[in-house]
């Protein structure tokens, strides 16, 4: 099968679940091309990107005159502003009966505004005209890109278009209309939970899709409730998966080697993007409580993001500089070392003020696959991975006291650490193995293609 993947950034460290999926498809002999909006600026490149030549598979749509030439060649009757507007309407970019991004009467209105009498009022009224022309140009260029991409996909024999995140699904729908290639997409977290995410365009795209993948039962319930007419049958729950061979538990003899210099403080690891929905400020407050109770520990927080300066200040204000370290982003090798030398993994996810929240964090899967007991919260789909009291502990969100108590409980009971670690590994092997999740994905796509051909 040949699949065209649509996403915004390639490669992106916080979206390794997309890389894992594409790599597993390639390993199984399927062809993958990647339609990305732009490269992601990073000095840390996951090893699989080079190993499987992923960057050689990426197509970045170019905003060039060449695309406009492709557009004109595809529809010679768009050389006038009125014809351009007709093209935009035919392509479905503007809402039926709506004003569109350019505003009411974009072409005629622009001409009338440009002809206003001089003076302050005339100058002010020209600004909407310029915005209208820029809006028109953006939409024409977008359509030019779609036409060029559609031609490329048809010539390469693409079987299916799959977008990651609901916000990219409308672009997949447009390409599907131009090529008659079916499209599906995966709904994750911010793309459906954040305030304003479920726009009219996104909802209509959901209804037209050949299939929707959701990464949790929680997501399916959420969309069933918030998108009228979108039934359970159209949505397939397929968890994100990880490559288990890269996350092997630490064996007892290895653990002894790590601790050979004698007893050390318990080590708590967190890996996350530093953003509101991760709840990291509550974790630092929990660390303050542990320190005030005389509990010896060391914590490492791996990642980066907009909240980093505030988190650094919070650590200093709590007097935790000798206990809590913020490392920034790290490469795969160093991250593996941190996993192997940690006793507990903590990720106190919350619902952000704009409604955004996590789906099922992949880093929790990685930690559990390594046999590390985890502490997290009851947010979103996390309870589908972490069985409270069996393979980890869950606490209410935004509750530093409960978080500190859970960490203290695990750190004070080596027997629980071992039991949670074994159960966690088994859960990930059973339900979050990338080999199995990609098998489910392929079965879903094959069913869609069979139905179209009958």
Image (cartoon, helix red, strand yellow):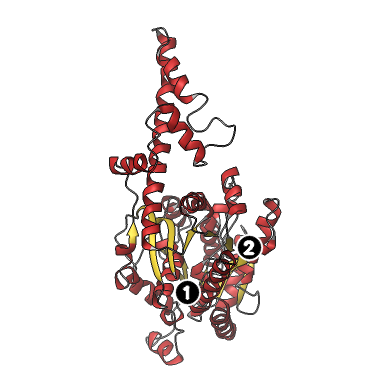
- Mark before the other along the chain sequence, 2 or 1: 2
Residue at the image position 50 percent from the left and 50 percent from the top: 177
Q: Secondary structure at mark 2?
A: strand
Q: Is residue 125 above or below residue 401?
A: above
Q: Which residue is mark 1?
A: 242
In the rendered image, residue 253, in percent from the top left (x then y), is placed at 42, 92
Which quarter of the image is occupied by the N terminus? bottom left
Residue at the image position 45 percent from the left and 61 percent from the top: 320
Q: How far apart are the two marked residues, 2 and 1, measured between alpha carbons?
A: 22 Å
Q: Which mark is residue 235?
A: 2
Which quarter of the image is occupied by the C terminus? bottom right
In the rendered image, residue 376, in percent from the top left (x then y), is placed at 58, 67
Q: Is residue 321 above or below residue 48?
A: above
Quarter of the view holding residue 413: bottom right
Quarter of the view holding residue 323: bottom left
In the rendered image, residue 227, in percent from the top left (x then y), is placed at 67, 51
Which of 279 and 68 lies nearest the eye of the viewer?
68
Q: Nearer the viewer, mark 2 or mark 1?
A: 2
Q: Is residue 143 above or below residue 183?
A: above
Residue at the image position 69 percent from the left and 62 percent from the top: 232
In the rendered image, residue 16, in percent from the top left (x then y), is placed at 43, 66
Mark 2 near mark 1, Cβ–Cβ under 8 Å? no
Q: Secondary structure at mark 1?
A: loop
Badge 1: few (under 14), some or many (20 or more) residues near its Cα, within 10 Å?
many
């Amino acid at each position: 099968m040949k699949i065209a993947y649509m996403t915004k950034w390639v490669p992106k460290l916080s979206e390794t679940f997309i890389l894992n999926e594409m790599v597993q498809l390639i390993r199984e002999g399927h062809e993958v091309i990647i339609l990305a909006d732009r490269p992601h600026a990073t000095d840390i490149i996951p090893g699989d990107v080079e190993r499987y030549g992923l960057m050689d598979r990426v197509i970045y749509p170019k905003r060039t005159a060449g695309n406009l030439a492709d557009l004109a060649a595809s529809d010679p009757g768009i050389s006038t502003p009125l014809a351009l507007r007709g093209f935009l309407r035919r392509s479905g970019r503007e809402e039926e009966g709506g004003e569109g991004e350019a505003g009411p009467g974009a072409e005629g209105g622009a001409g009338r505004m440009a002809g206003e009498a001089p003076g302050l009022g005339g100058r002010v009224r020209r600004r909407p005209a310029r915005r209208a022309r820029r809006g028109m140009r953006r939409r024409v260029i977008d359509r030019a890109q779609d036409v060029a991409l559609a031609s490329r996909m048809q010539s390469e024999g693409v079987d299916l278009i799959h977008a990651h995140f609901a916000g990219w699904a409308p672009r997949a729908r447009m390409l599907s209309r131009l090529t008659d290639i079916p499209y599906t997409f995966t709904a994750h977290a911010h793309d459906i939970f954040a305030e304003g995410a479920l726009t009219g365009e996104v909802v209509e795209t959901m209804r037209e899709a050949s299939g929707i993948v959701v990464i949790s039962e929680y997501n399916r319930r959420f969309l069933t409730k918030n998108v009228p007419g979108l039934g359970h049958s159209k949505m397939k729950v397929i968890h994100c998966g990880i490559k288990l061979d890269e996350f092997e538990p630490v064996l007892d003899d290895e653990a002894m080697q790590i601790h050979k210099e004698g007893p050390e403080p318990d080590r708590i690891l967190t890996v996350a993007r530093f953003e509101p929905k991760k709840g990291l400020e509550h974790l630092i407050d929990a660390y303050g409580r542990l320190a005030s109770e005389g509990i010896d520990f060391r914590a490492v927080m791996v990642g980066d993001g907009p909240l980093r300066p505030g988190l650094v200040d919070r650590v200093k204000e709590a007097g935790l500089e000798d206990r809590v370290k913020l490392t920034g982003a790290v490469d795969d090798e160093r991250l593996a070392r941190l996993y192997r030398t940690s006793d507990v993994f903590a990720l106190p996810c919350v619902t952000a003020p704009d409604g955004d929240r996590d789906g099922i964090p992949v880093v929790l899967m990685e930690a559990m696959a390594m046999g590390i007991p985890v502490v997290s919260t009851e947010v979103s789909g996390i309870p589908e991975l972490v069985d409270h009291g069996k393979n980890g502990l869950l606490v209410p969100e935004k509750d530093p006291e409960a978080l500190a108590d859970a960490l203290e409980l695990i750190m004070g009971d080596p027997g629980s650490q071992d039991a949670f670690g074994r159960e966690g590994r088994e859960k990930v092997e059973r339900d979050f193995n990338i080999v199995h999740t990609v098998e489910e994905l392929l079965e879903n796509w094959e069913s869609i293609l069979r139905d179209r051909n009958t």
